[in-house]
Each structure stands twice: as structure tokens, then as C-alpha cells.
Image (cartoon, helix red, strand yellow):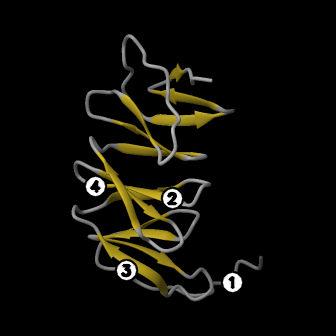
């Protein structure tokens, strides 16, 4: 509220990536930090080196991108839940995440069933959500009812 610095710390030698839920990707670890003190609540080492910021959904799951795999963990406890291949750039959904693989196919990663329509030509590029719609490389992707 005041803009005054509460704490600062270093998590490894690489530039960390953090999300709104206090999950930090640093070197080969994923950890959740206490926002008041900056101390780790839990730490998990993943089978692959994590890349990019972790993505947390509203149902209590966090997805983190590895080199070839996306890993799902519980946000509060860091318990491993599932892994998905292929892995790529992530974008959060209310329940799950979207991932675009190297071929440009968009996948819904979720621990609950929710799917995107399959398109005749799969777009490539960044996954973006705006006004309740999903865009991949600037192309709107319709959702199944």
C-alpha cells in the first residue's frame, strides 16, 4: 500500500520468474514464497529445468514449463499432479492452462475436462486471452460449449 520495500532475497544465480500466486521458477526449482517474509513455503526440484514463469489457475493448480514437458502441481502444497507432453509456452485458464507446441497445435492442459475446438489449420504463435476469448498468433480459437 505504501510502496515501501518489505524484503528482498536471491533465489539462485539466474533471474527468477514469479507469478501472482507467489510461485517462483529459479534455476532447476519451483518454489512458493511467503509474500510477507520472502521465505520459501515449499520447494520442488523438477525432472527438467523449468522455463518461464509458472502459471496458476483458479482451481488450485500450477503449471510450469520444462524443456519438453509441462508439469502440474498443487499451488498451496507443491504436490505433483500430472505431466503433459509436448511442452511449450503457457497461458492460464480458470481451470488449467493452454500450451502451444512447436508444431503450433494448441492444447488445453487441465485436471478437469475442457477442450478447445480443433481447427483445420492450427495457428502458431503466442497464446493470449482477451475478453473471454483465446487468440493464438492473432487467430481467435473457438471454445466448445
Q: Are marks 4 and 1 in contact (CB under 8 Å)?
A: no
Q: CA distance from mark 3 to mark 2?
A: 22 Å
- Say which mark, if any, is on residue 61: 2
- Say which mark, if any, is on residue 19: none
Residue 53 sits in which quadrant?
Answer: bottom left
In the rendered image, which residue does mark 1 sit on? 4
Of circles 3 and 2, the one toward us is 2
Q: Are marks 3 and 2 in contact (CB under 8 Å)?
A: no
Q: Is 137 left or right of 48, judged from the image as shown?
A: right
Residue ranking furthest to the right: 1
- Say which mark, if any, is on residue 66: 4
User: Would residue 58 be seen by someone viewing this image from the given angle?
Assistant: yes
- Say which mark, if any, is on residue 11: 3
Q: Dot 2 lies on which element?
A: strand
Q: CA distance from mark 3 to mark 1?
A: 21 Å
Name the residue located 52 percent from the left edge and 28 percent from the top edge: 135
Q: Is 137 left or right of 144, judged from the image as shown?
A: left
Q: CA distance from mark 2 to mark 1?
A: 31 Å
Q: Quadrant of the C terminus?
A: top right
Q: Is 89 left or right of 60, judged from the image as shown?
A: left
Q: Position of residue 115 (x, y in %)?
A: 50, 30
Q: Are marks 4 and 2 in contact (CB under 8 Å)?
A: no
Q: Is 31 left or right of 88, judged from the image as shown?
A: right
Name the residue located 56 percent from the left edge and 30 percent from the top edge: 134
Amino acid at each position: 500500500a505504501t510502496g515501501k520495500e518489505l524484503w528482498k532475497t536471491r533465489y539462485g544465480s539466474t533471474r527468477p520468474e514469479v507469478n501472482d500466486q507467489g510461485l517462483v521458477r529459479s534455476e532447476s526449482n519451483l518454489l512458493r514464497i511467503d509474500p510477507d517474509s520472502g521465505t520459501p513455503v515449499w520447494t520442488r526440484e523438477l525432472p527438467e529445468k523449468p522455463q518461464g514463469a509458472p502459471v496458476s489457475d483458479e482451481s488450485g493448480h500450477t503449471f510450469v514449463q520444462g524443456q519438453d514437458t509441462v508439469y502440474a502441481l498443487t499451488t498451496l502444497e507443491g504436490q505433483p499432479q500430472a505431466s503433459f507432453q509436448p511442452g511449450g509456452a503457457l497461458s492460464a485458464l480458470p481451470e488449467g492452462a493452454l500450451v502451444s507446441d512447436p508444431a503450433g497445435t494448441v492444447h488445453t492442459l487441465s485436471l478437469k475436462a475442457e477442450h478447445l475446438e480443433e481447427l483445420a489449420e492450427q495457428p502458431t504463435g503466442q497464446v493470449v486471452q482477451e475478453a473471454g476469448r483465446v487468440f493464438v498468433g492473432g487467430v481467435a480459437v473457438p471454445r466448445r460449449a
